[in-house]
Amino acid sequence: MSVAGNTRARSSMGDATQSGSGLHILILIAAFVFIWTVYPTFTRINLDQYGDMLENYAWGIGWQWGYFKHPPFFAWTTAAWFEIFPNADWAYYLLSAANAGLAVFLSWRIAVRFLDPWRSFLAAALFFFLPPVTFLATKFNANAALLPLWPLTVLFYLRFLENKKLSDAIILGLVAAIAMLTKYFSAVLLASIVLHILVDRQARQLLRRPATWIAAGVFLAAFAPHVFWLMQVDFLPITYAASQGDGSMVEGFISGLRFVVAMVLYAAPVGIILYITLIRNRSAGARLLDRSGLRRFTDSVQGRALLWTTFGSIGVTVIVGILLGTELSSVWALPMFFSLPIFLLAPIAGNALEVRREVVPVIIGIYCVGLLAAAPIIRYFEDGEEKHYSHLPIAAIADALEAAWKQQTDAPLMYVAGEKALSSGASFYGKSRPYAIIENSFAFTPWIKPENLLQSGLAAACLEGQQDCEAALAAFPVHFEQAETVTVQGESGKAWTVRLHIALPAEG
């Protein structure tokens, strides 16, 4: 088939599938959110094995401009979500799934600029098989929170390139700031946008438009309060980030290589599903690939922008990692896959995916049914494999701590401390919703002051034998009148011994 023939075929396909395409994508995303809420709810004993999701909440309810490990936006998101939803595991997984579902929707909005409606739908459908947006995204943290923010940033950059509207520029600046307020790693995406503007002759025209500089001003204004906070806390999050890796270029090179290999492995399931779809659609003698489909990315400023924001951000990450000797974690790549299906679908020849359109929906249906059917089996194996906090009965210990407090006083429980997962867990699961002292440190929890504890009291929980936890409690400016040892049984049948400490509030 000629290039012109491909164009006519795609045009006719676009006309045929335009009607109802918005409804179809909403149904697809609703199914996505449902599956990835239900699956982790019925396969996990605890929210996550490291206690990070509980810590997100404990941070967020402090409503600070930053926290000792990260900037604040994903913690704010968590706190705001639970102002509406109950503090329950399923609701947290719903947040994770909705966050990933929004990323799929925004990636689809980018796809419609480069693919016909049917293939744009396929681009969204392929996210079902992409681990960074599914299995890994069930753990809501700074990396997962970037999933919708990167495509949203790119989408408004594309819109600004297309229309040069001031409104798009303002939103671009604001969204870019939010991405940075979520994780500093977003700087590599912003760097790729800047590089594209500088390198691409057509994009360079933006430098002569006031709207571009207004966008930069909006970004700086939105980010400025966090910078002011950083100065107040001696740049704690940046110090934490800089501690990753040993600082050698050799380590940076090896880490960068592992990072790229991990990305290829993450993308492999999508490639396999797409190959199966091609085989099922293939007609005798028909071509599968048409390289002319890639020209849409090289022949337009918007296409080149997508190339830069996708592959440029990967390149910047690896180069900076090598120069700084940073140990790159594969989970940092979670937001980098927003355009992968677009680039995989673009070079496929016309009609090579359209003969049997039911293939991908059927595969998705089988896959989702299989996931739900396998949930009890996955849960069985989860019961048998203990890692970090995966089996710790955090919610039950939170109830025991609150019960011990209520035996001593009718005052509300305001502050908790002790073992990291237990204090954050008491904050999340406890009926009083107390504030947790992060890592038992006032420096890491500046919204809590020593005088607050003297006035309102403190409850704390340490696992039996945790001498460092007990020592940290001894440093607090309160007197623990009551201490008791309780035994709490986890879902796996294992019994956990916990020391509960109560410092009563000041009288009167």
Image: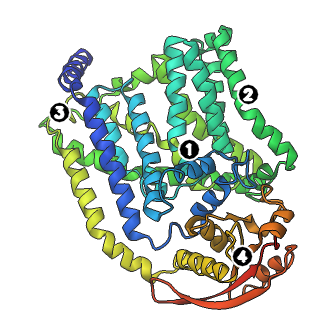
Secondary structure beneath label 2: helix
- Residue at the spot 67% in from the left edge and 71% down from the top edge: 423
Of the numbered discs 3 and 4, the one sitting upstream in the chain is 3
**Disc 2/disc 1 C-alpha distance (Å):** 21 Å
Numbered disc in front, either 2 or 3: 2
Of the numbered discs 2 and 1, the one sitting upstream in the chain is 1
Secondary structure beneath label 1: helix
Give the image location of residue 87, x and y in percent. 51, 61
Task: Indicate the amino acid at tag 3.
Answer: Ala
Compare residues 5 and 73 and report the one nearer the observer.
73
Q: Which residue is mark 2?
A: 221
Q: Which residue is mark 4?
A: 459
Task: Indicate the amino acid at tag 4.
Answer: Ala
**Disc 2/disc 3 C-alpha distance (Å):** 55 Å
Q: Is residue 25 left or right of residue 225?
A: left
Residue 286's disc is 3
